[in-house]
Image (cartoon, rainbow, N blue to C red):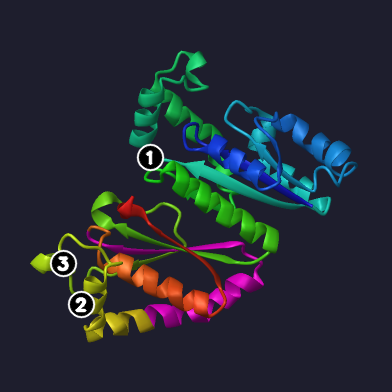
Amino acid sequence: MKLIIVSGLSGSGKSIALHTFEDCGYYCIDNLPITLLPGFVSKIMLEEQKLYAKTAIGIDARNQGEFLVAFGRTLDFIRSKGIDCKVFYMQAEEATLLKRYSETRRRHPLTDQNLSLTEAIKAEKEILKNVSKYADLVIDTSRTQFHQLRMLIKSQIEAVDAQQLLVQIQSFGYKHGMPMNADYVFDVRILPNPYWVQELRGLTGKDQEVIDFLSSEDIVQEYFDGMSGFLEHWIPYFEKENRSYLTIAIGCTGGQHRSVFLAEKLAAKFKADGLKTLVLHRELN
């Protein structure tokens, strides 16, 4: 049996995640009081295994109190029942959350406590910090659009269902900030930059002209060989630990040329090697 606990900051996309789980055949419950979770597992899930064989439950900051503080013990209890339990934690930058609430005019669930929106976001982070540290997967949606997030969640679900390691490769631009959920980060700013070639400036690492330019540089191939060799050596160790996800981030200055090219090249190699691979380009939204 599989149980996915979806938690995280309000406005980060938890509802989208739960709807995606539902579309993928999971029985979904939003905002189940965490005090009811052990009873739900032992009295309902295990007794109605056919109906609840794949379940996703949303838990948010309104679940305060002793059970949220003791979240680790709750997970231990669930897993002691033989249930494959994973925690998805969703987050976004404060500026992004403020913008989303401004655009939708929705009320933050903690603003009932006479807090401003900014104060509510900070308070929510503090409340959920004990949940976030147990996360099997952290998803930052600061620069993720609706359809990209659904695609990402579906890929993670497939990895859980297949009990196979999913390697997620993400390109990004350092000038827009580093990704918050990467296991490995590779800095490729030392490589020749197509941005300084006038006819390549408006293209991306997916365009053939940029591919030809970077492929002709020996240092680019040398960097790729070192990076891919390092990962090929260590990925089997992640698989032995039954990890479901591994996130590799590749960054250049703007996230348009070098990082995109190497992310695509690495993804193609891993797919050819039989690894389940997902590639995302954060700055090419």
Q: Residue furthest right?
A: 47
Q: Are marks 2 and 3 in contact (CB under 8 Å)?
A: yes
Q: Secondary structure at mark 3?
A: helix
Q: Looking at the image, which residue is at 25% across and 63% down?
A: 204
The label number, if any, that marks residue 200 in the structure image = 3
In reply to whether residue 251 is colored magenta, the answer given is yes
Question: For the residue carrying disc 2, how many other residues have a C-alpha within 10 Å: few (<14), some (14-19), or many (20+)?
Answer: some
Who comes first in sequence, dot 3 or dot 1? 1
Question: Does residue 57 lie above or below 174 as drawn?
Answer: above
Q: Which residue is mark 1?
A: 93
Compared across the picture, whether 209 is left or right of 153 comes to left
Residue identified by numbered label 2: 213
Q: Residue furthest front?
A: 208
Q: Within the image, what quadrant is residue 64 found in? A: top right
Under circle 1, the secondary element is loop
- How far apart are the alpha carbons under marks 3 and 1? 32 Å
Q: In the shown orientation, is residue 31 left or right of residue 211?
A: right
Q: Nearer the viewer, mark 3 or mark 1?
A: 3
Which x, y percent locates residue 146?
A: 45, 42
The secondary structure type at the circle numbered 2 is: helix
| Residue at screen point 37% across, 68% down | 263
Q: Position of residue 250 (x, y in %)?
A: 35, 65
140 vs 114, nearest the viewer: 140
Is there any visible trace of residue 220 in the rendered image?
A: yes
At x 62%, y 60%, the residue is 159
Look at the image and give the residue range highlighted in magenta: 226-253
* Residue 167 picture location, percent across and down: 52, 66
Q: Residue at x 39, y 30 (%)?
A: 100
Question: Would residue 231 be seen by someone viewing this image from the given angle?
Answer: no
Q: State left or right for residue 13 relative to residue 51.
A: left
- What amino acid is found at the position of numbered circle 2 in the picture? Phe
Does residue 18 show up magenta in the picture?
A: no
